[in-house]
Amino acid sequence: MIAFVLRRLIQSVIVMIAVAFISFLLFQYVGDPVSFLLGQDATPEEVREMRAALGLDQPFFVQFWYFLGNAVQGDFGMSLRQAAKVSGLIGERFPATLELALVAAFLALVIGIPMGVYTALRRGTFMSQVFMAISLLGVSLPTFLIGILLILVFAVGLGWFPSFGRGDTVQLGWWSTGLLTLDGWHHIVLPAVTLAIFQLTLIMRLVRAEMLEVLRTDYIKFARARGLSNRAIHFGHALKNTLVPVMTITGLQLGGLIAFAIITESVFQWPGMGLLFIQAVTFADIPVMAAYLCLVALIFVVINLVVDLLYFVVDPRLRVGKAGGH
Amino acid sequence: MKKTISRWLDSDVGYSFRSSPVAIGAAVIALVCVFCALFAGWVAPHNPFDLAALELGDARLPPAWHADGRTKYLLGTDDQGRDILSALIYGARISLVVGVVSVVLSVVAGVVFGLLAGFFGGWLDAFLMRVCDVMLSFPPILVALLIAGVGRAMFPNAHETLAFGVLILSITLTGWVQYARTVRGSTLVERNKEYVQAARVTGVAPSRIMLRHVLPNVTGPVMVLATIQVATAIITEATLSFLGVGVPPTSPSLGTLIRVGNDYIFSGEWWITVFPGAMLVLIALSVNLLGDWLRDALNPRLR
């Protein structure tokens, strides 16, 4: 167990260093920061001073070391486009993205799992075929198109929900939340549904497949032979074992939600990190891109790690297998 | 030609094709899309790139069945008076070209790396698989966006001309990993089979063993993956173009058309967005269905 945790930790650190290295390369070599800061008509003297001030005259690995040191402290320098610190920009956008992703994940789970269970238990009925058809459409529909269609129907056509922005927010220390106001909830509906649909179809198909698999196993047959009610078998025995892989995938997909949030935020002008990133990409704002990359990598690595550890906690076979020394 | 077609229809795969209405339907739709794209110049009623033919007076006309629509423009016109149907056909061509080219490139890269890793093993295998691990732990759209962004930063002035190259490169670089993994896995299995050992004993060169003996036996999964990846690549292209980092507006793909139309949905001109969007879904759905069918047809366990 400890060896496993250590190995995963070391792997995570290696991934982070690799990502930090890529960010560093971007940072130093794509787009010349010196000519950007000084303008085109700087004297060679000024350029040299600026290079020294930025530490660009140091050896390569010394520079990387400084970069790492700063990055660990969350310091990624100044945005090239907006006259503000990158860490500040990301910090004020982060709550919006996280709230959006969490609400979407919640929706996907709460709707996706029952739909998956239903289609597995009532295979071949009209409703479950409808669900399966919807899920195929959900996989083929690109996220941005779902967003546009929802805006078209529910914002422009019916006028039920607003189509852009976060609405009223409440400040809790440095965290601005839209989940404490009615207006905020009103605004989060469409973007959260957009973000949730793809995950929802994925979870539904996964639960269905796993459930069908589990229902064929011997212990379910044995439970039936014991005369347990369908309800106890389906929800007490089968569903519990179905949820292990579902938990893993959902955990990993939470990272995917943050990435897909780029698209959703862009459609709904949701003031989160994704919108910041897409603006940075459009204007080649390298420090913001590098910082976003590092932050997303960190989130991914942490989620992966937690999921791996949870797997250990949930699935006793893994622990036994390791203890047996295979 | 006729003979090969009838022979194909008699084969196992052909039989499963004939007996699957979904596959036939999807194939017909996909073929129609490809045909329209290839012969866009003849199929499209107007040439959307001919600036002389554009009339601003015709801008933002609704579809023909609408009271204000004109039969000349079956699906209406966009903000510059371009015929939506024609723009859609030309757009589908660009989407298909970008999708197919990037899939072909990633198949080639993935197959080569996968074969090398699986056949030789050792540090090369370990290194390539670690790279795959890192790439797979990030969503493709994020990696593609990043590459597109870096491309922009490196060539700030030339991105109109380079946009296609950067776009295709970014989709390719995110796509090859899957093929490399699949091919490596199959190669590891094939490598230890008797026919490969026999070839090795008789002194066949490793490159020849890989290309003539191992490769034909790993093509099945690669074909299935490639079909599905065409749909993924088209959607990725559309997404990047929609976000403004893909195809330049001078030669709009479906994603670019949707992006343009997105500005008009609040003023009620829904057709500028909805029709390109429907086209995109139609292509993606038919290709996905074909891929699903191919996977079942080529899976020996299901026969």
Image (cartoon, rainbow, N blue to C red):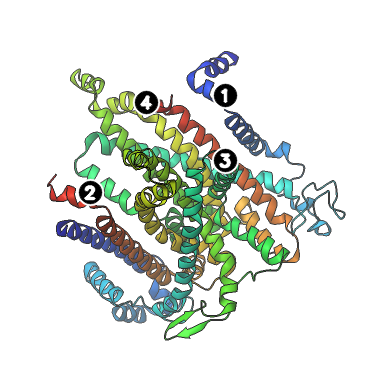
Q: Which residue is mark 3?
A: A125
Q: Which residue type carries mark 1?
A: Ser
Q: Position of residue B227 (x, y in %)?
A: 49, 37
Question: Is A21 above or below relative to B9?
Answer: below
Label 2 residue SS = helix
Q: Chain of mark 4?
A: B
What's the CA distance linking mark 4 and mark 3? Answer: 42 Å
Q: Which residue type carries mark 4?
A: Pro
Residue located 30% across and 37% down the image: B184
Question: Is A297 above or below relative to B218?
Answer: below
> Looking at the image, is mark 2 or mark 3 nearer the viewer?
3
Q: Which residue type carries mark 3?
A: Thr
Q: Which quarter of the rendered picture does the C terminus of chain B lie within?
A: top left
Quarter-wise, where is residue B110 in the image? top left
Mark sitting on residue B19: 1
Q: Which residue is mark 4?
A: B216
Badge 4: few (under 14), some or many (20 or more) residues near its Cα, within 10 Å? few
Q: Report whether residue B158 is seen.
A: no
Q: Nearer the viewer, residue A225 or B216?
A: A225
Residue located 27% across and 52% down the image: A315
> Looking at the image, is mark 4 or mark 3 nearer the viewer?
3
What's the CA distance linking mark 3 and mark 1? Answer: 23 Å
Q: Chain of mark 2?
A: A
